[in-house]
Amino acid sequence: MANKKITGIPEIDMIAASIAKKFGKENIMTLGPKYEKVTPVSTGSISLDACLGVGGLPNDRVVEIYGPPSAGKTSLCLQVLKQYTDKHGYDRPPVYVDLERTTGLDLVQSMGLQPEKMIFCYPDTAEEALQLCQDLGKTGKVGVIVFDSIDAAQSEKDTKRLMNETGVGDLPRLLSKALRSISKISVDNECLYLFINQVRMKIGVMYGNPETTSGGNAIPFYCSVRLRVSSKPSKDQDGAITMKVKVVKNKVAPALNKTAEFDFICGKGTDPYLDIIGYAKDTGIMRFAGSSVKWINPATGEEESLCTGGKLGAKSHFIENPEDYQLLYDFILNPDQEDTKEDDT
């Protein structure tokens, strides 16, 4: 039987066929379909999706979201779950591994999710939680797994220690072992893992950034995307926070150290209209001249008058003219789309 041509080089094709026969899997390829193109899961914020470079979070990778207390980490994860279920439904239900025991039913429902169709896990130890993440991911029947949070994970040995006894390195060793499997499971089964983490400060650091995260170095190494979340009260809206998300690590697109800033309404999520208006203004696609709002029309490439009334006027215009909103949305996520069309013609 002739060897399958992969590269056209007989020696390499022979080794590839031998490896596939021995292990029952094609390990040598020019570019596997699983790595060919990332299918994104929207974060619910057009500005953050644009900063990530692929239109959202990769649906088959490990992602870490970390930041200080009350920054909006859990709310951002719930918004990602909402975006995923809006697009894919609950056929592959999202999983929420709650080690902190702090997320309430009212918050989940207010974000537009259906708790009765989700899977909630309340493990007692880090070993249980990580084993759940592995086993559920291997089934291929779940779409997103949220691990809340790494710092709340307590090893079984630690649960048996007295308060005055300490153990060094239990959790980092567990995470390092588990993530070797989880990083492969996520790709093989197209499952997005969202790990929430907390910020700690290194003691005695006089120069440089003293900030660090819990759980050792395993998570920063194995994650394809890392997002640092911070927030402050919004100046424009009551009951909202201005969330600032920085892309600290990105291995799925050439987009690094970019920052998205948007208003997040507590319990509801991002306002898509104000978010896209703010991002368009920051990137020069839209500008305000007094009460008049002007934009560079993606269809023509020329500056035109859009409406009057500032931000609120632009929001009302997009609500009444969804085709303009969609045009701007597609242009922001695919800025080279028009150039590609011209090249094809």
Image (cartoon, rainbow, N blue to C red):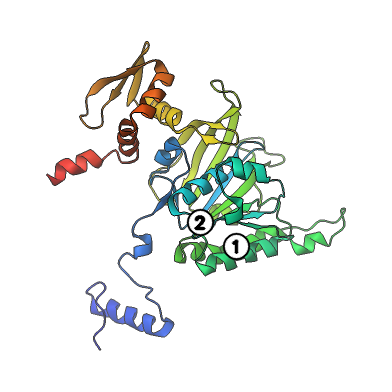
Q: Quadrant of residue 281?
A: top left
> Which residue is tagged 2?
90
> Which residue is tagged 1?
133
Expressed as whole percent of the image width and height from the top left, the position of residue 40 reads 41, 50
Of tags 2 and 1, the one toward the viewer is 2
Q: Which tag, 2 or 1, sits closer to the chain's start?
A: 2
Expressed as whole percent of the image width and height from the top left, the position of residue 154 reads 74, 57
Q: In the displayed image of the protein, which residue is found farthest to the bottom?
A: 1
Q: Residue at x 70, y 60 (%)?
A: 126
Quadrant that contains the C terminus: top left
Q: Is residue 258 visible?
A: no
Q: CA distance from mark 2 to mark 1?
A: 18 Å
Expressed as whole percent of the image width and height from the top left, the position of residue 272 reads 45, 33
- 128 relative to 332, above or below: below
Quadrant that contains the N terminus: bottom left
Crowding around mark 1 (Cα neighbors within 10 Å: few <14, some 14 to 19, many 20+) is: many
Q: Residue at x 59, y 52 (%)?
A: 195
Identify residue type, mark 1.
Cys
Q: Is residue 252 visible?
A: yes
Residue in front for this viewpoint, 99 or 151: 99
Side (left or right) of 327 relative to 25: left
Expressed as whole percent of the image width and height from the top left, the position of residue 284 reads 34, 25
- 27 relative to 160, above or below: below
Identify residue type, mark 2.
Tyr
